Image (spheres, helix red, strand yellow):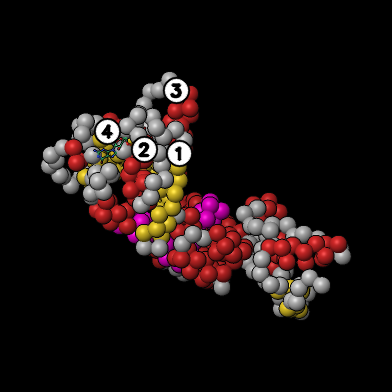
Amino acid sequence: MIDTVLVSKFQSPNSYTGEDSIEISCHGGVIIADMIIKVLIEAGAEYAEPGEFTKLAFLNGKLDLLQVEAVADMIHSVSTAGVATSARQLIGEFTLRLSAFREQLLRIAALLELELDFSEEGLELIDRKVIEEKINSSIQYCQELSDSYTASNILRSGYFVGIIGFPNSGKSTLFNTLLNRNRAIVSEIAGTTRDYLEETLYINNLPIRLIDTAGIRDSIDIIEIEGIKLVDSVIEQSNLILILNDASESLDNSNQLFDKLNEKYPQTQKLIIQNKTDLIDTIENNDNIFISAKNKTGIDKLKTFLENEIKQSTERVSDVLINQRHYNKLQEVLQNLTQAKVSLLNQMENEIISIDIRYATKLIGEITGEAWNEEVLDLIFSSFCIGK
Ligand SMILES: Nc1nc2c(ncn2[C@@H]2O[C@H](COP(=O)(O)OP(=O)(O)OP(=O)(O)O)[C@@H](O)[C@H]2O)c(=O)[nH]1
Ligand SMILES: [Mg+2]
């Protein structure tokens, strides 16, 4: 006797995997479930691989690849908006959109090929301008989808904000003030923070992944040097870098650092923040935000700024979450459509144009999983946990 449980029997094909299956619902806690699993294993059952159930569901045609990825996104999502979007993807909304897109391209290809059949009679059935417009709108649609990649990542994993600056500018103090607790060590000794620290802060239900880093300077301390090296990796994953300047030294102290970062990471959003303004008489300007991390002044303004930034960077997400795999395929689709457009403008044969468009439709099929291979499946299911 272990527990009194509920056993549910699912008859094929009406189960999650599409196969006959049994679900055992036991009372809560870890021990009971473990004891039941042990008995089952002794009786010949086997542990599932990570994502094995969802993989079976895919192989048995219960879910397409986009829906499979939606399951992973739902499980791992850190925001309510991310869950809502992947839930829509799970019921097949993204698949429908892509099928419509694919059909639109197939119609263009068909028009071009149809004309080919009549070409010997010298008839021009369709206006090339009309074809050009159709290709243009397809390119635009594809571009919009891939543009939402960054925004999708923010909904999926959070908005990454790195706090960067020279030693002693008050980075750890600001980190603590934003989190409202003393998480990082603060001291007047330059070089206090050696590793980097990451904590989550919620603004409007959206998680901000705040990262405190080691101050940037030429150092001879091995541990500090390692910490400074890590700053690059923090910047690389940041959506926004806050460059904290010690205003009591000079308002322009970090301008060169800003320029250098701008050169190295032109795509990443950056903002200089003037800190320690309690120590000086400031003439505020609109380019910077003026705060005292220690006295907690100007923090509301900074939070409002962050809130607006997140709003702006996530507004691109319409109703699908684009991941790296989708993004790469969409880039290939774009290339083929652009090639088709170039051929059209160069008065190439219809046949040449339609080959590229047909190839684009094949690529779209690969996104939904009409065409797949083991390598793609392994990649997708590696992000799953056991038992899903
Ligand atoms: N007056 C004043 N002092 C501040 C302010 N913010 C930080 N400090 C002080 O500046 C010193 C350095 O602060 P930290 O937060 O440790 O600076 P940091 O940038 O994290 O320094 P490292 O980790 O060494 O790179 C501490 O003595 C803080 O109390 C501020 O707004 N006003
Ligand atoms: Mg610090």
Crowdedness near tag 2: few (<14), some (14–19) or many (≥20) residues, C-alpha within 10 Å: some
The magenta-colored residue range is 308-329
Q: Residue at x 45, y 23 (%)?
A: 221
Distance Cα–Cα, label 1 vs label 4: 20 Å
Q: Nearer the viewer, mark 3 or mark 2?
A: 2
Q: Which residue is mark 2?
A: 186
Using the image, tell me which numbered label, if any, was put on residue 196.
1
Q: Nearer the viewer, residue 165 or 347?
A: 165
Q: Nearer the viewer, residue 293 or 255?
A: 293
Q: Is residue 340 visible?
A: no
Q: Earlier in the sequence, mark 1 or mark 4?
A: 1
Q: Secondary structure under badge 1?
A: loop
Distance Cα–Cα, label 3 vs label 4: 22 Å
Q: Which residue is mark 3?
A: 221
Q: Name which residue type carries label 1.
A: Tyr
Examine the structure image and report whether residue 318 is included in the region drawn in magenta: yes
Q: Residue at x 65, y 53 (%)?
A: 382
Q: Which residue is mark 4?
A: 254
For ligand 2, the image quadrant comes to: top left
Residue 316: percent from the left, percent from the top? 39, 60
- The quarter of the rendered structure image containing the N terminus is bottom right
Q: Earlier in the sequence, mark 3 or mark 1?
A: 1
Check contact, mark 3 vs mark 4: CB within 8 A: no
Q: Residue at x 28, y 30 (%)?
A: 256
- The quarter of the rendered structure image containing the C terminus is bottom right
Figure quadrant of residue 21: bottom right
